[in-house]
Image (cartoon, rainbow, N blue to C red):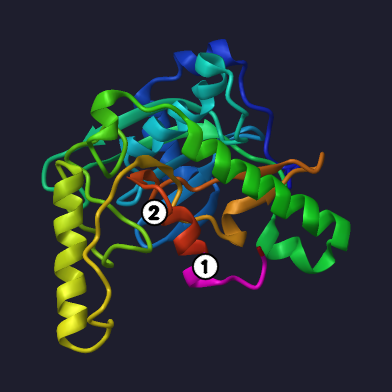
Amino acid sequence: MEDPDIPEHSPSLQMEKVSDEVLTALFDTAPVLHSYEGTRIVRLSRTLILKGGTGARPCEANILRLVAGAREREGSKTIPVPRVHRVLNVETENVFSGCKCLILMDFVDGTSIEQCWGDLSQAARVDVVSQVASMINALRSIALSQEQQQQPGPVDCKGCVARGYWFTDIGAGPFNSKKHLEAWFNRRLEISQKFHQAPETVPPFHFDKLVLTHLDISPRNLILGPDGKVWLIDWGDAGIYPDGFEIASLKARRFEAP
């Protein structure tokens, strides 16, 4: 929810004039909203946040812009996501995850589903689930370029490793093709079968269609706004992955909330 002690941000024209150096300094001094495993989010104003650290990568901004622009490009149903204003301080040298940066984006006002689920009526819960299902369908329907359809992993960031539920704690890749991704999963399947962690009857992986995937749809990343709209945040693990990865990860984790 909004904090009355945080002043209104400058108009967008003035914000555009704020230098990268000033924003970098604010990242070290502004109030911290969230900090976890090397990623930090600070509140710059009532409407703006700055995300940075080892978990903030340009590919997150890339997919947010791709999702936000889908409706304008092809008339697809909108998915409520934070708007990205600027990506700065991109580093690619000696960065374990491939690259890192600072991302200036909108603050999403509301309460996480993780916090408010117990207080919602049955009708409100059904509405939340319906909105999330609609998001997943809309996300996988967004058109990708020919190059993107052949390049699994983080969006337009070939040096970044794939992260999320289906990968190791340190990530995997980068992957240069669907065949490369298949080979990685099939190698893990072979190891699992060797140690009797998977049935011998499980066939090798073969991926056909790649789609946009969030990979971390969870109650903490779903924000219920004052108007009842559900927003999807934290796209740090998102990317282009085989169709079905999203649903499979949701089923595998089985949250108490949707």
On residue 174, the disc is none
Label 1 crowd (10 A; few <14 / some 14-19 / many >=20): few
* Tag 2: amino acid: Thr
Secondary structure beneath dot 2 equals: strand
10 Å crowding of disc 2: few (<14), some (14-19), many (20+): some
Give me the residue at 23% from left, 89% from top.
196
Residue 111 visible, this orientation: no
For residue 154, above or below residue 258:
above
Residue sitting nearer the eye, 212 or 199: 199
Is 256 one of the magenta-colored residues? yes
Q: Is residue 98 left or right of residue 76?
A: left
Q: Residue furthest bottom?
A: 196
Amino acid carrying label 1: it is: Lys
| Nearer to me, 253 or 63 | 253
Residue 181 screen position, x and y as percent? 20, 52
Q: Quadrant of the C terminus?
A: bottom right
Quadrant position of residue 24: top left
Mark 1 near mark 2, Cβ–Cβ under 8 Å?
Answer: no
Q: In this view, does 140 lie to the left or right of 230?
A: left
Q: Where is residue 66 in the image (x, y as percent from the top left)?
A: 44, 27
- Badge 2 is on which residue? 39
User: Is 158 or 30 nearer to us in this picture?
Assistant: 158
The residue at 15%/78% (across/down) is 191
Spatial CA distance of label 1 from label 2 is: 27 Å
* Residue at horizontal 67 percent and vertical 67 percent from the top: 257
State which region is magenta. 251-257
Q: Is the residue 170 above or below the residue 191 in the image?
A: above
Dot 1 or dot 2, earlier in sequence: 2
**Label disc, if present, on residue 251 of the rendered structure:** 1
Residue 100: horizontal and vertical position, in percent?
27, 42
Q: Is residue 45 visible?
A: yes
